[in-house]
Image: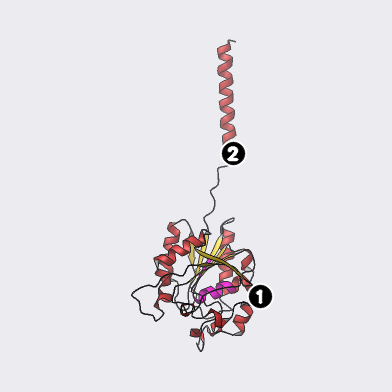
Amino acid sequence: MSIRRILAGGALAMACASIVATAAMPAAQSAPAPQVVIVPGQTFGALPYQPLAQHLDSLGYRTTVLDLPGHDLRGEPARIAATVNRLRAQHPGASVSLIGHSIGGLTARWYLDQLGGNRVVDKYIAIGTPQYGSPGACGQEFGAEACPGTPYLRQLNAGINTAGTTQYFDIRNEREWVDGHLTGRQCRVTPIRDLQPLPDVGLEHTAEPFDPEVWQAITDSLAGKCDGVIANQPAGSITAQSSLYPGRR
């Protein structure tokens, strides 16, 4: 057998071996898309959050908007838990983050703190949430648990607010009734500027889900960027009174 034929045969064998080895290798798996769950404010429903959800989807997130009325602050967290559990089962390895607007931030945090969600949720982003209560909830037919000093809030705010492995972010506008501060480690995003020329009657709070600056603050937070300051206050250092009317201090 000639040297040329021996070399040709060896080259053919090496090529075949390379093809077999390549075929045996598993296809590269792309990282699962991060999951985001939006918890609406009271009586808002899911519809106003669809533009935000579509925006997040365009950035590579997969967004679920819950249709919760915000009337049952102790019962609705179970639906948040069920959604997070379903997403984790359907998308193994994907992170799951929560965005809670207004009172939705309370029900989302109840899930984290009271139902063990702070062991599985990646990031919690509260927008205009009355973490220690708001006077606007006092005397309401629904959601009155958000009135400062209720047993609900005392239970929710006992100890460190940000326990677990979840990262906590707070977004609010400059005219918010409350500052949204929590004890423990929290990113306090630089307050969103006034939405001029809206009058000072609280319309910014309602408009937050549509505000491009809020959207940017959300995407920064989901990416782990703190556009503001990192605080780490001890348990018991925040009261309902100290959290009220941050723009008037």
Q: Position of residue 174 (x, y in %)?
A: 44, 74
State which quadrant residue 239 falls in: bottom right
- For mark 1, what is the residue? 159
Amino acid type at image mark 1:
Gly
- For mark 2, what is the residue? 25
Q: Residues within 10 Å of mark 2 (few under 14, many from 20)?
A: few
Alpha carbons under labels 2 and 1: distance apart:
51 Å
Q: Are marks 2 and 1 in contact (CB under 8 Å)?
A: no
Q: Which residue is at a point 59% across and 23% down the rendered structure image?
A: 13
Please state the total of marks drawn on the protein image: 2
Q: In the visual, does 75 lie left or right of 55?
A: right
* Of residues 102 and 190, the one drawn nearer to the viewer in this rendering: 190
Q: Which residue is at a point 45% across and 61% down the rendered structure image?
A: 56
Upstream in sequence: badge 2 or badge 1: 2
Q: Residue furthest top?
A: 2
Residue range in magenta is: 98-109
Query: Does the image show residue 47?
Result: no
Q: Quadrant of the N terminus?
A: top right
Q: Residue furthest bottom?
A: 139
- Up the image or down, 121 lies above or below 6; here it is below
The question of residue 115 being in magenta is answered with: no
* Of residues 233 and 165, the one drawn nearer to the viewer in this rendering: 233
Query: Does the image show residue 223?
Result: yes
State which quadrant residue 93 falls in: bottom right
Amino acid type at image mark 2:
Met
* Of residues 209 and 186, the one drawn nearer to the viewer in this rendering: 186
Q: Position of residue 184 (x, y in %)?
A: 62, 70
SS of the residue under disc 2: loop
Q: In the visual, does 118 lie left or right of 222?
A: right
- Up the image or down, 142 lies above or below 24; here it is below
Q: Position of residue 245 (x, y in %)?
A: 48, 80
